[in-house]
């Protein structure tokens, strides 16, 4: 399976629930993971593309036949039941994820893997009463961010208070800042190199890039201290 670690990591952040939806499911691997381990009672898998949905329908055919899963071809959450307990949206841009949620509904648990603009997703979750209970970067060839948002329980409220977001957490992710991994250190090294190359190519001072490089180096030094 392509990017097997990415799929495993996504699945590892999903919680056991009554009802699960995988929005933009494509192949349907995450829904298969939930159903075959009995981690959800029922599942809806959706995709805006009929061809992508057909892949998931083939993979999940035994569960569809048994009445435990249903595929829907739609944009975002349009045909996903509003009482779904946990929703996964992975492999789309951060703006698209936030727009899908804003136009749809806000389930108790969200697992999100934006491909870019993760900050927008963090801000969206926090502005909508979610505790961001997981927020870190991992590497599977490329670098990926993954977030879990939870709301509406005493435990979520407690975690929301404990995991307060300031500027650094919004920019880099709570777990990356407070419990960094070697994957996050590698992401920082990569960003430092990219930023330094852009500064060199500009051949004149670019204050915004200089500031970013300074911040990246600062966070990198803190990360190395944590990892030692
Ligand atoms: C890169 S794939 C990711 C597939 C899977 N979620 C994963 O993480 O491996 C993105 C999928 O989202 C679907 N998609 C894109 N925009 C969508 C939208 N607004 N609503 C539903 N599905 C969408 C695409 O058709 C595609 O199958």
Image (spheres, grey):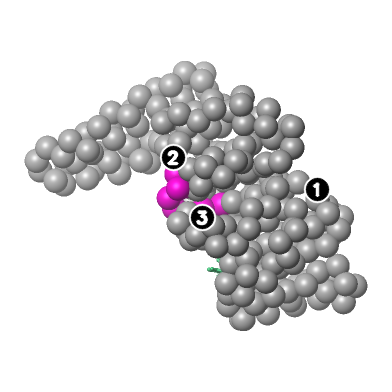
Tell how many labels: 3
For the residue with label 3, is its CB less than 8 Å from the closest atom of ligand 1? no
Which residue does the image show at 71% across and 61% down from the upper left? 82
Q: Secondary structure at mark 1?
A: loop
**In the image as oriented, which residue stretches furthest toward the left?**
204
Residue 155 position, x and y percent, is 73, 32
Q: Is residue 200 left or right of residue 153?
A: left
- The residue shown at (69%, 35%) is 156
Q: Name the residue tied to disc 3.
A: 98
Label whose residue precedes the other's in the sequence (2 or 3): 3
Asked whether the residues under the numbered discs 2 and 3 touch, taking CB atoms below 8 Å apart as contact, a structural biologist would say no
Q: Residue 188: x, y in percent?
A: 40, 36
Residue sitting at x 75%, y 58%: 83
Q: Position of residue 60 (x, y in %)?
A: 78, 71
Residue corresponding to mark 1 = 16
| Crowding at mark 1 (Cα within 10 Å: few <14, some 14-19, many 20+) | some
Magenta region, residue range? 113-120
Tell me, yes or no, whether the highlighted magenta stretch contains residue 119: yes
In this rendering, position of residue 214 left or right of residue 7? left
Identify the residue position indicated by label 2 in the image: 187
Q: Residue 112, percent across and down?
A: 59, 51
The image quarter containing residue 221 is top left
Q: Is residue 29 visible?
A: no
């Amino acid at each position: 399976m392509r990017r097997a670690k990415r799929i495993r990591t996504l699945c590892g952040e999903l919680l056991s629930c009554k009802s699960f939806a995988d929005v933009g499911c494509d192949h349907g691997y995450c829904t298969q993971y939930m159903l075959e381990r009995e981690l959800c009672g029922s599942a809806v898998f959706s995709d805006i593309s009929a061809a992508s949905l057909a892949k998931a329908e083939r993979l999940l055919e035994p569960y569809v036949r048994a009445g435990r899963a249903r595929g829907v071809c739609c944009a975002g959450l349009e045909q996903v039941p509003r009482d779904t307990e946990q929703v996964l949206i992975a492999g789309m841009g951060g703006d698209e994820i936030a727009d899908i949620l804003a136009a749809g509904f806000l389930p108790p648990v969200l697992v999100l893997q934006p491909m870019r603009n993760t900050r927008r997703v963090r801000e969206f979750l926090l502005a909508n009463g979610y505790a961001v209970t997981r927020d870190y970067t991992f590497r599977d060839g490329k670098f990926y961010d993954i977030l879990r948002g939870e709301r509406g329980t005493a435990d979520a409220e407690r975690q929301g208070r404990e995991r307060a977001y300031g500027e650094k957490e919004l920019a880099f992710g709570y777990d990356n800042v407070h419990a960094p991994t070697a994957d996050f250190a590698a992401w920082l090294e990569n960003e430092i190199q990219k930023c330094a190359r852009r500064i060199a190519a500009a051949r004149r001072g670019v204050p915004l890039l200089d500031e970013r490089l300074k911040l990246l180096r600062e966070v990198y030094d803190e990360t190395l201290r944590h990892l030692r």
